[in-house]
Image (tube, grey):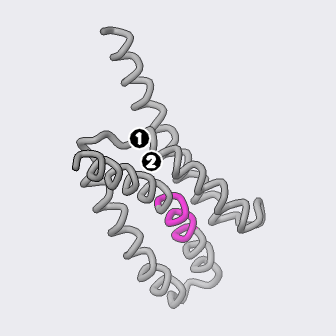
Amino acid sequence: MPERKKEIEYKAVAGVITFSLGLVIAVILGILPELLSRGHTILLLGILGIIAGIINVTSEEVDRYLLAGLAFLVAGSGLIALVRELPVGGLNLALVYIIQNIVAFVAPAIGIIGLKVIYDVAKSK
């Protein structure tokens, strides 16, 4: 039994690290978009999002995570439109990139979790 507990603790820590790393990378690449091409940025964040979706969300958290993630994806579009109109010089472009990067990170996680839920529902029938 202690081995199972260690596995759960390791998975929880790995999930938090993966999610935090994804957010930090999204912000850094939003501030410094020239570090990677846009395609490579989306690919990196997408892969991290998939990993975070697989290891980070427990079955008890699925509903809350899906709701919060979908709310952010929807709000992200509005935020981008709002931020583009802010009179803050070049800062608004960095904020737009940051929001787009977070959306690129969160969307694959939401997709993976959504597919897991669909599979579980279909399996139970």
The disc at residue 26 is none
For the residues labelled 2 and 1, the Cα–Cα distance comes to 6 Å
> Which kind of residue does numbered mark 1 sit on?
Asn
* Residue 69 relative to residue 19: left or right: left
Callout 2 crowding tier (Cα within 10 Å): few <14, some 14–19, many ≥20: many
Q: Nearer the viewer, residue 62 or 95?
A: 62
Q: Nearer the viewer, residue 117 or 80?
A: 117
The disc at residue 53 is 2
State the residue at coordinates (77%, 60%): 35
Up/down of 23 relative to 4, above or below = below
Coordinates of residue 80 in the picture (x, y in percent): 49, 80
* Residue 109 relative to residue 89: left or right: left
* Residue 90 relative to residue 103: left or right: right
Q: Are marks 2 and 1 in contact (CB under 8 Å)?
A: yes
Please give the range of residues in magenta: 98-106
* Residue 64 relative to residue 42: left or right: left
Q: How many marks?
A: 2
Up/down of 28 relative to 53, above or below = below
State the residue at coordinates (44%, 38%): 55
Up/down of 116 relative to 92, above or below = above
Look at the image and tell me in which quarter the N terminus lies: top left
Q: Quadrant of residue 4?
A: top left
Task: Name the residue that disc number 1 marks.
Answer: 56
Residue reaching furthest to the front = 125
